[in-house]
Amino acid sequence: MRDMEKHQEIMARGYDYIIANESEHEQVFIEIYYNEKFVASINQEHGLENLEIEFPGSNDVESLIMRKVPLNDFLDLVNEAAKRLG
């Protein structure tokens, strides 16, 4: 399956991501959402060779967070998003 088709298929299943840049981060990062709720962020604070994924903490507002998501689509989206940082 071509990359664009795969991307559209994943988005149709409720996933989305945004590339962001905030003052607390030295580099751009990606936030991943599922059904409009935050799932995780990927940062490149330690370089493109050492990307990190961060999940919401226990102090975050639960109504804005999705803690369980379908794994295969999530992994596909994480890989796609990580490529966008490079």
Image (cartoon, grey):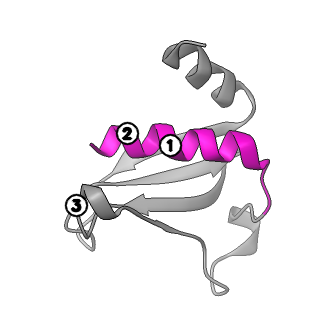
The x, y position of residue 13, in whole percent, is: 75, 31
Cα distance in 3D space between marks 3 and 1: 18 Å
- Give the structural element (helix, strand or loop) at label 1: helix
Label 1 is placed on what type of residue? Asn
Contact (Cβ within 8 Å) of mark 2 with mark 3: no
Q: Quadrant of residue 27?
A: bottom left
Residue that mark 3 sits on: 27
- The magenta segment is 68-86
User: Which residue type does callout 3 highlight?
Assistant: Gln
| Front label number (3 vs 1) | 1
Apparent side of residue 54 relative to residue 22 in the rendered image (left or right): right
Q: Which label was assigned to residue 12?
A: none
Label 2: element kind: helix
Residue that mark 2 sits on: 83
**CB of mark 2 within 8 Å of CB of mark 1?**
yes
Identify the residue under disc 1: 79
Label 3 element class:
loop
Using residue 2 as the reference point, say whether residue 49 is left or right of it.
left
